[in-house]
Amino acid sequence: MAGLEEVRRVYETYLGRMEELQRNRKPAEGLFGVGGGPAADPCQEEFPRQLEAVLKALERTEPASPEARQVLEYLYQAPLPYRQEDQTVYWMLTAVHGASLDLIPRLTPEDAGAMWERYRQDYPRWERLPAQKKVLAALKARRKG
């Protein structure tokens, strides 16, 4: 599945850069806004742009529900290991969920329903970003057909 491979490549590039930045970080870098740290690196702007371009290209291919579901599951599960480990990465990977909205209509109602249930469990109401609220609303609407 070329779409999923491209998405993974974008994520791996971003995550590799963030790992490198963390490894090379100076002790007080980013503290009190001094030095910026990993959160100020250009990869924070490049990643969402690259991901959006890949997702738009995938959407134009009109993927069937199984392919769309694989990509969406990857996107929606990717932040979870970073929830406690790296807040900068967690919130970036979560914020880009909004770029997935155009793929949700490609899901069958059954796939959308299963994903809606999982998403609600994985992302508690009190920590949802506006993008996540839109994803939940789109999944809920699609599961109803």
Image: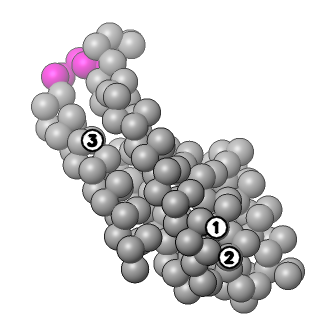
**Secondary structure type for disc 3:** helix
In this rendering, the answer to whether 94 lies above or below 138 is above
| Residue 83 visible at all | no
Q: Residue at x 60, y 84 (%)?
A: 64
The N terminus sits in image quarter: bottom left
The disc at residue 106 is: 2
Across and down, in percent, residue 17 comes to 24, 42
Q: Earlier in the sequence, mark 3 or mark 2?
A: 3
The C terminus sits in image quarter: bottom right
Query: Is 35 left or right of 23, judged from the image as shown?
Result: right
| Residue 85 visible at all | yes
Q: Residue furthest front?
A: 61
Q: Residue at x 34, y 35 (%)?
A: 43
Dominant secondary structure of the residues highlighted in magenta in the image: loop
**Secondary structure type for disc 1:** helix
The disc at residue 58 is: none
Q: Residue at x 35, y 54 (%)?
A: 10
Query: Is 122 left or right of 5, judged from the image as shown?
Result: right
Query: Is 14 left or right of 139, judged from the image as shown?
Result: left
Residue highlighted by disc 3 = 18
Give the residues in magenta: 26-30
Rendering quarter of residue 81 = bottom left
The disc at residue 103 is: 1
